[in-house]
Each structure stands twice: as structure tokens, then as C-alpha cells.
């Protein structure tokens, strides 16, 4: 039985064809992956289905009713049975589970007052129905990341009479989840599908497609490539369909040679860190691995002056440097790309041009006048140098795909020619093509004499791009793996040492 049929969906922006006659079908009780590189049209398609953007052409059929997408609104989408959990979830961590569920549908009232007991009972019923291990009065932030996603899903679906109604659309639900949490969420989604729920699943993580998807529709440059069964393909075949290139062409990466010491750390203590010693050399990419709570992200934040340094010595190019604040770190030649792009690195209300110039903005001020013309010219040059795809330099940062947003953030710092590049989860939420391009940018930076520290929860990524990997556990160095020893399994073994000790 077909739960959703999309037919001939098209959309253009200022002459650029974002979607060109895209059609696909979603079966009842199935997980249907929507795949493609950054800029392929996935986000545009989701926004059209949600009624955020009007289509130029195309329609959907759901529940036996046909809807023209040029007239779709968010109200009509919800009435048609389309339910969305976006990557940037609209839940409220500081509020209770009950409040979050009630905000999704409205509070029951009597004589102008909220009926709290009724809201609590209803929240408990929803949690039981969706088999979520939580209490209505718990604050959302107290729950595990995967459970928070489940609450967001339950909020979206709570008004359905049964699991065979409507369509659930999940946009990158695991983007910020650690591996054990991902497995928990995928198991839950399979249970929902088995019960009859139709699910559209957008992800960049191809291993999740093989784990959970029954079918997959692939887009490239706004056009439909194919709809396939993942069980009929391997990882390399799926990548080639998505990107139009082989895995070898995408993931080829040459090691950079080592040179003199650029960054030297001795006895660094900050937050959970309890005396870290580390030397990173010119032309070297050093991976920083560890489980959540190991101190891996704190190390980068401490070096950039975001987390106060309690003790230790830091030198750059042989000169001792006192870590104070981000301004001082920038003056010392340090660049920092944080883990949470939206929260800590992106200025979504500004243009791409303005985001690119934020780290060098003083150079555009002349006699109290901002040189916007030169700023725009430089931005266009950066588009070419850093492989950024955007409608124009004045396009809103929020209009870019995740991979292009990340390349803007990286370019913003690399244009300063930093001596030390600190990268926290630099490829989180980007596709395999953009990931390879970001790797190339890292190699380009260190080949010019810099050094890079890369934190990643993807141990295969660290093994692929790093010259060596330092593994942290409980704020201390657990071990170090050199080039010839590198491998995801070896990194994982060291990272889990703290659990066995």
C-alpha cells in the first residue's frame, strides 16, 4: 500500500533549478531514505512537503487525496497527515516532557486555566504508547539525546489515531548523536515501521541507510537518480549513485610531511583535563579521540580561550604563550571551528559574504567606512578557493546546504593563514562529497606549514585523515597511535580503555 506518492516536484530559485521533475513513492510501514550530496535538493524537497516553500510544479497523494504543492502550507501539510522532525528540533530542553508534548498540540484548559493533571495523564499515555522511558515531569535535558529525539517524534505523531496513518519525515535525526544513541534510535524507528508507520528518513550517514531503510531515493543536482533497495548495493555502489564518482575518487587523501614543532603543550589542566602533554608539528594532522566526557572538546576550547586554563604551558613556534581569551588566541595564530555550527559558529541572519569576513572585518574598514565592494569581491574568490556553492555572495547563510555552511566556517578561519587549526567534528552533518572537500582544505592548510588538531567521534575519519591520533580518557592521555598503527578498531580499543579500568 502506498502511503505517499510525490509526482513531478520542481522548484527553481533565480534561474537555478533546485528540483527538476522529482517523483517517488513511499510504502506503508516502510523506512524510505532520501539521499544525495549537499545541494542535491533534499532540503528543498522537505521544505516543499512541509509547506515552507511553494513548488513551481508537482503534487503529492496521501491518504487517497491529491494536493498541489504550489498551494501547500504548513497547516495543509499537517492536515494531510505529514509530520516533521527537523534537524534543528523545536523542542525545549529546559521544559518538562509534559510541557514539550503539550506545546505540540495545546494545553487542555477549563475556565481559562490549564488542567495540569489532565496534561500529565495525557503525557504519560503518549510516553507509554511510544515506549519512551521517561516521566512527564522530567526536564527534557535530563534525558539521553536519543530519547529527546523520540520525544520530538512522539510530539509530532501524538494526534494520530494509529500508526498506519500519515507520514513521518525525519531530517538528519542522528546528526548530533553518539554511536550508541544512534543504534537505540534506529531500533525504535524499525519498531515504528513494523507497526505500520511510514517514514521518510534523511541522513548523510550511509551505514544508517543499510541498517534501517527498506528503500532509498537518490537525488543529484536536483534530479532523481534512482530509487533502489539498499540490500542490493554495497557502500561503494551507493556512494557512486549519490555522487557520480567512485569512493576512491572521493576519499583519496595524501599524508602531509612533518616539520618543526608548531604547538607544544605541557601539563595542561582545564575542566576535566588533568595534565595533557602534546606536540604538533608543521604539516601534521593530529587526531584527538575519546569517548564523551574524555575532555577531547575541552582541549580545543582551552587552547582557544573559551574554557579557562587552570595550569600548564603552551608555546607556538617556540614562543611561550599565555592562553587568555579568543581574541588573544586569534592574535597568536589559532583558529577554532566548534562542534555545534548553528549555535557557536553560524550567523544565519547574515549573508554568506558577511559570515566569511567576520574574522578579518577590520581590514575592510577605511576611515569609518566599510568597504563592501572589496568584501564581496573577496567572498567570490573564496567561493572558488574553498569550493563553496551558493546562489550569490549575498545569499543568506541559512540558505546553504550543511556541507557548504561548514566550508564557509572553515574558509572564514583559513583565510587568516592560522598556525594552529582546531577542528571539532569538522564533517558532522555533511555528505561524503563535502566531507572529502573539507579533508582537502585541512591538508591544504597544513601543507602551507600549519598544524591541525582534529576532534572526531568518527574513528574511521581520524584513521583516514590523521598522521597520528592521541586518545584521551577521563581527562588524561590514554595512548597514542602512529601512522602505521592507525585504524578505527585500534582507536576504539584505546578509547574504551577507561571503561575497563
Image (tube, helix red, strand yellow):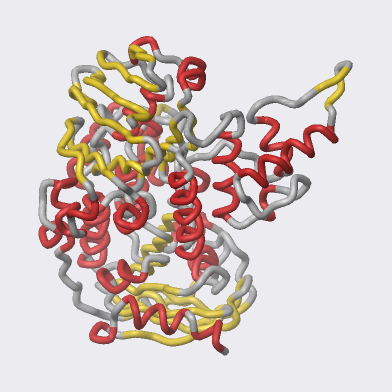
Q: Position of residue 247 (x, y in %)?
A: 15, 59
Quarter residue 306 falls in: bottom right
Residue 374 shows in this picture: no
**Foreground: 389 or 363?**
389
- In the displayed structure, does residue 326 sit left or right of residue 423? right
Quarter of the image holding residue 199?
top left
Indicate the position of residue 378 as horizontal and vertical percent values.
25, 37
Q: Measuring 67% from the left and 36% from the top, which residue is drawn there?
A: 101
Q: Quadrant of the C terminus?
A: bottom right
> Relative to 266, is 227 above or below?
above
Location of residue 100 in the rendering, given as x and y in whole percent from the top left corner: 67, 37
> x and y percent of residue 443 in the render?
23, 64
Viewed as shown, does residue 140 lie left or right of 275? right
Foreground of the two, 277 or 462: 462
Rendered image quadrant of residue 3: top left
452 left or right of 119?
Answer: left
Amino acid at each position: 500500500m502506498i502511503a505517499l506518492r510525490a509526482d513531478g516536484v520542481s522548484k527553481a530559485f533565480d534561474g537555478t533549478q533546485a528540483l527538476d521533475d522529482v517523483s517517488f513513492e513511499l510504502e506503508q510501514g516502510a523506512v524510505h531514505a532520501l539521499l544525495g550530496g549537499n545541494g542535491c535538493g533534499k532540503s528543498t524537497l522537505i521544505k516543499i512537503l512541509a509547506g515552507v516553500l511553494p513548488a513551481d510544479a508537482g503534487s503529492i497523494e496521501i491518504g487517497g487525496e491529491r494536493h498541489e504543492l504550489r498551494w501547500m502550507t504548513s497547516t495543509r501539510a499537517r492536515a494531510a497527515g505529514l509530520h516533521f522532525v527537523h534537524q534543528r528540533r523545536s523542542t525545549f530542553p529546559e521544559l518538562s516532557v509534559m510541557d514539550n508534548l503539550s506545546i505540540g498540540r495545546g494545553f487542555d484548559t477549563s475556565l481559562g486555566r490549564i488542567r495540569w493533571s489532565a496534561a500529565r495523564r495525557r503525557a504519560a499515555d503518549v510516553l507509554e504508547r511510544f515506549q519512551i522511558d521517561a516521566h512527564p515531569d522530567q526536564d527534557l535535558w535530563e534525558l539521553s539525546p536519543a530519547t529527546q529525539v523520540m520525544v520530538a517524534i512522539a510530539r509530532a505523531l501524538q494526534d494520530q489515531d494509529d500508526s498506519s496513518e500519515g507520514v513521518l519525515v525525519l531530517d538528519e535525526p542522528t546528526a548530533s548523536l553518539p554511536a550508541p544513541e544512534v543504534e537505540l534510535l534506529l531500533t525504535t524507528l524499525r519498531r515504528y515501521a513494523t507497526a505500520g508507520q511510514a517514514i521518510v528518513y534523511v541522513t548523510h550517514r550511509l551505514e544508517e541507510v543499510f541498517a534501517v531503510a527498506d528503500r532509498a531515493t537518490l537525488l543529484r543536482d536536483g534530479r532523481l537518480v534512482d530509487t533502489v533497495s539498499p540490500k542490493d548495493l554495497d557502500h561503494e555502489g551507493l556512494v557512486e549513485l549519490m555522487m557520480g564518482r567512485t569512493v576512491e575518487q572521493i576519499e583519496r587523501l595524501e599524508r602531509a610531511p612533518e616539520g618543526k614543532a608548531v604547538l607544544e603543550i605541557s601539563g595542561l589542566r582545564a575542566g576535566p583535563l588533568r595534565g595533557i602533554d602534546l606536540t604538533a608539528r608543521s604539516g601534521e594532522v593530529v587526531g584527538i579521540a575519546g569517548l564523551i566526557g574524555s575532555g577531547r572538546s575541552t582541549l580545543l576550547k582551552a587552547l582557544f580561550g573559551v574554557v579557562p586554563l587552570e595550569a600548564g604551558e603552551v608555546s607556538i613556534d617556540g614562543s611561550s604563550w599565555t592562553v587568555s581569551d579568543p581574541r588573544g588566541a586569534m592574535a597568536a595564530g589559532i583558529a577554532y571551528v566548534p562542534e555545534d555550527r548553528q549555535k557557536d559558529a553560524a550567523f544565519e541572519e547574515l549573508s554568506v559574504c558577511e559570515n566569511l569576513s567576520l574574522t578579518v572585518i577590520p581590514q575592510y574598514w577605511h576611515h569609518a567606512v566599510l568597504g563592501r565592494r572589496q568584501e564581496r569581491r573577496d567572498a567570490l574568490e573564496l567561493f572558488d578557493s574553498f569550493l563553496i556553492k551558493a546562489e550569490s555572495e549575498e545569499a543568506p547563510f541559512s540558505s546553504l546546504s550543511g556541507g557548504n555552511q561548514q566550508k564557509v566556517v572553515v574558509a572564514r578561519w583559513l583565510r587568516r593563514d592560522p598556525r594552529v587549526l582546531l577542528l571539532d567534528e569538522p564533517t558532522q552533518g555533511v555528505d561524503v562529497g563535502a566531507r572529502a572537500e573539507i579533508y582537502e582544505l585541512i591538508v591544504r592548510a597544513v601543507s602551507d606549514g600549519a598544524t591541525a588538531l582534529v576532534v572526531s567521534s568518527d574513528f574511521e575519519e581520524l584513521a583516514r585523515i590523521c598522521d597520528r591520533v592521541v586518545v584521551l580518557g577521563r581527562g588524561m592521555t590514554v595512548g597514542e597511535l602512529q601512522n602505521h598503527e592507525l585504524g578505527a578498531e585500534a582507536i576504539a580499543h584505546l578509547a574504551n580503555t577507561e571503561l575497563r579500568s
